[in-house]
Amino acid sequence: MIMKRAIITFLCLLIFTLAYPQEEPELKEAFLDGEYFMRYEEFKDALPLYLLVFENNTDNANINYRIGVCYLNIPGQKEKSISYLEKAVGN
């Protein structure tokens, strides 16, 4: 009985760990690509990558800050930067 329970627990954990990490590398890659574009002041290219990461972690101060900076440096988008920068400072 204990062995059966241990096997079922192990299989459940295995299934959840295999399903979850698939998302993480994509988000990490999107963040790193955003960093690359940000470094070269390509804010229009960095923004969609940061927004992808933001969808999965809206409370991250770092992501909110970077999105705010992108909007701040894209002509005609300064107004959009305010809420993200305020959220970044609030965290």
Image (tube, helix red, strand yellow):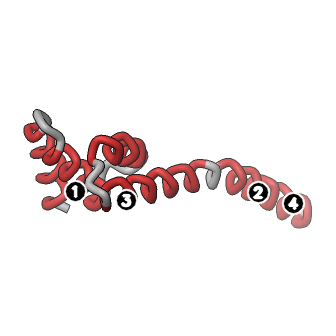
* Quarter residue 35 falls in: bottom left
Mark 2–mark 1 CB contact (< 8 Å): no
Question: Residue 43, which numbered label?
Answer: none
x, y percentage for residue 64? 25, 52
Q: Name the residue carrying label 4.
A: 7
What residue is rendered at 11% in x and 52% in y? Answer: 86
Q: Name the residue carrying label 3.
A: 35
Question: Which of the marked residues, 1 or 4, is nearer the chain's N terminus?
Answer: 4
Question: Which of the marked residues, 2 or 1, is nearer the chain's N terminus?
Answer: 2
Quadrant position of the N terminus in the picture: bottom right
Question: Which of the marked residues, 1 or 3, is nearer the chain's N terminus?
Answer: 3
Residue at the front extreme? Answer: 40
State whether residue 79 is above or below residue 9. above
Q: Name the residue carrying label 1.
A: 65
Label 1 or label 3, whichever lies nearer to me, is 3
Q: Secondary structure at mark 3?
A: helix
Label 3 or label 2, whichever lies nearer to me, is 3
Q: Is residue 27 left or right of residue 5?
A: left
Q: CA distance from mark 1 to mark 4?
A: 45 Å
Label 2 or label 1, whichever lies nearer to me, is 1
Q: Residues within 10 Å of mark 2 (few under 14, many from 20)?
A: few
Residue at the top extreme? Answer: 76
x, y percentage for residue 73? 16, 47
Question: Residue 14, which numbered label?
Answer: 2
x, y percentage for residue 12? 75, 53
Q: Secondary structure at mark 1?
A: helix
Q: CA distance from mark 2 to mark 4?
A: 10 Å
Q: Secondary structure at mark 2?
A: helix
Mark 1–mark 4 CB contact (< 8 Å): no
What residue is rendered at 39% in x and 58% in y? Answer: 36
